[in-house]
Amino acid sequence: MSEVRKPRDPVTGHVKALAKGFKYLVEPNRMTLDYPAETMKLPPNYRGFFTVDDKKCIGCSMCEMVCPPEAITMVPRIIGEGGKTIPAPEGEKEAKGPKRTKRPVVNWGKCIFCYFCVDVCPVDAFIPTQVHDLAFEKDSEYRPSYEEYLKPPEEPYKNAKKVVSKADLKRGVGYDPAP
Amino acid sequence: MNEKVYNIDDLQNVNVDGEKYIILQIGPSHPGSGHMRIKVWLDGDIIVKVDPDIGFVHRTSEWLSERREWIKAVPIVERIMLPDTVHANLAYVLTVEKLLGIEPPPRAQYLRSLVAEINRITSHLYGIGIFGIFLGSSTVYMWAFGDREPFIDLMEMLTGARITTSYIIPGGVRWDLPNGFKERAETVLQYMERRLKDYEDIWVKNPVVQARTINVGTLKKEDAIALGVVGPNLRASGVYYDTRKHQPYAAYSNIDFEVPTMKNGDSYDRLLIRVEEIKQSIRMIRQILKDIPEGKIVADQIYNQLNPVMKKNYEEKKRVMFPAFMIHMRPPAGEAAAKVEAGRGEIFFYIKSTGDKYPYRFRWVTPSFRNLPYFTHVAVGHRLADLPTIYGSIDYFPPEADR
Amino acid sequence: MGIIPIPLIIWLIEDLLYLIIFPGLVTILVIVIVIIWLERKIAAKVQMRFGPLWVSKKIGGALQSLADLLRYSFQEVIIPEKADKLAFILAPGLMFAFATIALIFIPVGPYYSVLFPSYYTILFSLALIIITPIFAITVGWASDNKFSFIGALREGFLLISYEVPFLLSVVSMIIIFRTYDYISAVQSQLSFLPGIILNPLAALTMLIVMIRTTGRFPFDITEADSELVLGLYTEYSALFFGVGMATPYVELYNFSLIFSLLFLGGWWPFTLNVMNPIYGLILPGIIVVIKAFIVMAILVFLRAVYPRYRLDQAVRSGWSYVLLLSVLSVILSVGEVVFLR
Amino acid sequence: MNIKDELSKISTNIVIDEKKANYKIVVDDLSKLIDIANSLKNLGFDHVVSVTGIDYPDKIEVVWHVSSYSVDNLKGINLALSVAVKKPEPIKQSDPQGNIYIKRPPVTVPSLVSVWPSGIFNEREAFEMFGIIFEGHPDLRYLMLPEDFYETWPMRKDFTYQRAKVFIE
């Protein structure tokens, strides 16, 4: 490796460094995304916020058991008409009886988006989305109720230009308009 | 050049509490310290003694993992070493697989090597970038962090997350290669090869960098062995040791690669060896994408436990879901140790199981923790301005050392 | 406006001209704001990113520095308990003041000699410029912080090692032009050749010293943030910090003006020698400031290329290569004077 | 060089798992520890990878994992050097306010820093986490824990803690 290590003589070194810097100064080469003005459309397996399919879920609590940060809690529910669930009566901690069941709620303040719950679900009831850039103002928003949790997350910056990233030979990451 | 004024052995007898020395507390909130405190005794501008005080970001990962189900340790170990997530994940899973006696199929092995090498490049770029900002070059910092982006995008495409991938699970991996991955990876590799030449001009062969790093922080071969340093820093001192060669895991026994070593062991060698390893990783990724065999991406023991919904998902989306075994995993009693060569060096896992649903003893040692002697032994005798050089060149990452 | 007599307006305009345009405070403010913005933009361009943008998106974020200045103005002033309070408060202001006063002695047009008739402007401006680092050392002393103190020590070392080459490079130009006045120096360049061709060695020395004295890379040693947090200004906050940070840019402006006057031919190609404020001051002034601005842009570009040297390397090169260069430049000047004229 | 033979020359009590490339030497007698470590070092095991404390109900086990950088055919081996010490009985104490708390005395084993200097930070960590006093360690201070963890030995299995349920808004 001695030829790698050999120091370059100072004059050539300075000239080459300055020339390289100047080359980058005049060349169009920005790789940053102008974020709030442009937002990215992420690959389909990106792990963003997720909700649950109320009809598919069987209330087996596997997701609660596998959750590493213990972000998922099961809330008691009663199966109503058409397979949809309605809230269990007040004060009932444990769901019992034929129509009683449980549904998961995620505390977004704790969730680490590992998707273990999504993968462990025996009926594949979770609905993943690619929304990742939500911000919450209050603690209570981190911990949605089950009804709030069921609403699909809305992307911020709806007017932003949608782009997809691509590998670019010139600037590493390039952006194409999203299809 | 930079002759050592003090002999290390004499320093053990120096009374460092006297009024003779300036005592600097560099950190924990200091632009050049990271999440640690470096207590430095200065005689004028010369460093007389260094005492690294770590533990400011100690997250009790061992304690937490001993009180959780086995699978839940995967995100924990990842979050300890953020630039090297895949390697931490891989090392833990290897240890658990040794306990369980599961052997993943070849395609999963190749995929593991693939993400590990992508991760190694990002880790080295992270190190180069931090070294750059420590010496004051914001350009290299921005370039290196920007050039991580194409590789992180590759990881995102494959695993669904940018950094904390949780990609490797006992028995295999969670997702198969998506469409268009190979072409995109090839473009990224060509881009990186071109950029390495630019790095050479503006950083590696920059006369200022050479003046700052050559013969600074030299660790001789014998000292490197005695102090037990790891990874690129060890190889920069001239020791031919790489876990990928000497205790092969994943697909490394089938991949042809070189282990670059240097002779001098100074900061410049530690910088060069990272560049060389990036070149080797590029070569390895090309090989893996060419040679990757077809087949399952998860071991049969896991696959057979999948229910029909999960099997359908596996066939259609190439996505491995978790059978209930993942939660209720109870590896048989015994102990296992595994080593993995991460970007910064060797991760060591030692896990003792009593057949319970939690690990009985979960011990792991991270590369930065083992590189701590660089501060106490190498920085002594240099100038204060060389401390960031040494810190940056060993690619020390305090959260990783604290665990 | 009609009630104000017209002669008063004319009289006011001329005075306001000096106060605002040159060497006025407004010019300094604008130059500092623009050069800081330009520095960040150049670095951002080389580093493949946008740089300051969202403060004023339509003009590329040019108001970012102004926003920063406003932010500094309204921040809380924190003075450490153990600081030498008088020195702590006064030193940054004095440093800025001396750097600004030095501008008075740097003429940008021939008409300036009417305003301030002096044959010794070079000497006056040098004397004032050399005073500013002393206040930098005071800043480091007053803070009662080890990092500031080490920064001040480094400033002292560098000050001594780079002042001699600086003075020698100016002296070599004085030898060539045979004058202590910028205006006659420029006029002798206009009639013959620009100083950078007459004595390139002195120009090179001057450039290196400019980089060093104003703390540009690769000589950003006193503020080395990975070692000394912010060097001298570790304990400073609010407007004091802003003033301390702006001073190097004012110095940079000073040096660049001197450089363009002594080496780049001053207001060449504008050679109309008319003694009135418009043709004698504003138009030549614009040309000189543009030249100075180009020099400044080149110097701030270095940030995008270099890391920083170590203190001992900088001091060593100051006492060896740069000193040698400056001595050679004096010899060259003497030779030219003896053989050419 | 057959590693099995070489190791059995050093100690009779070895556990070998060749499939996992794991070798373990169990030392019964504390006084022999340094001798065995020295002979391992002469064999070529030149650095410590990790020093692990393991807390059992009645004893504390200390495991030094050593490996080699210099001898080629030892590079693939993780050798564990294990020694177990009996735990002293916990002492009940009461502070002036009358609160009773349990003090768990530390155990003592010889330090191997004199043999392998690379274990210096590892042994400091095992000391603070398990209360293992390494005799002969040149610099046995707390490494990571803050001062209020003094003599609590948090990695022992009987360490109790109070879980904070505060979620700051």
Image (cartoon, coloured by chain):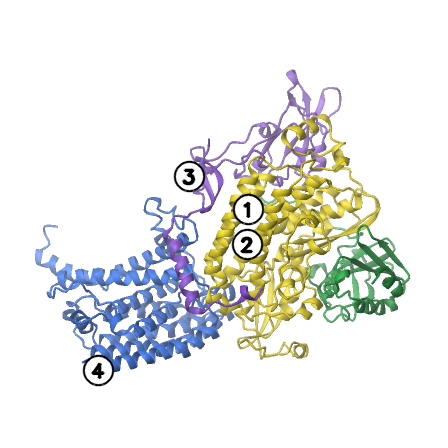
Single out the mark in the foreground, 4 or 3. 4
Badge 1: chain ID: B
**Residue on which the image places disc 1:** B151
Point out the image quarter for the C terminus of chain C.
bottom left
Q: Which SS class for mark 2?
A: helix
Question: Which subunit holds the residue at mark 2?
Answer: B
Marks 2 & 4, CB-CB < 8 Å contact: no
Residue farthest to the bottom? C338
Image mark 4: chain: C
Image x and y of residue B153, in percent: 54, 43
Q: CA distance from mark 1 to mark 3?
A: 24 Å
**Image height of A128 relative to C171, above or below:** above
Q: Which residue is mark 2?
A: B125
Judged from the image, the secondary structure of the residue bearing numbered disc 1 is helix
Task: Point out residue C78 in the picture as x, y percentages from the top left corner.
Answer: 45, 62
Question: Is the same chain shared between marks 1 and 3?
Answer: no
Dot 1 or dot 2: first in sequence order is 2
Residue D166 in view (yes/no): yes
Q: Amino acid type of disc 2?
A: Leu
Name the amino acid, label 4.
Phe
The residue that mark 3 highlights is A37
| Helix, strand or loop for disc 3 | loop
Task: Tell which tag, 4 or 1, sits nearer the viewer.
Answer: 4
Q: Which chain is blue?
A: C
CA distance for labels 2 and 3: 28 Å
Q: Colour of chain A?
A: purple
Q: Amino acid at mark 3?
A: Ala
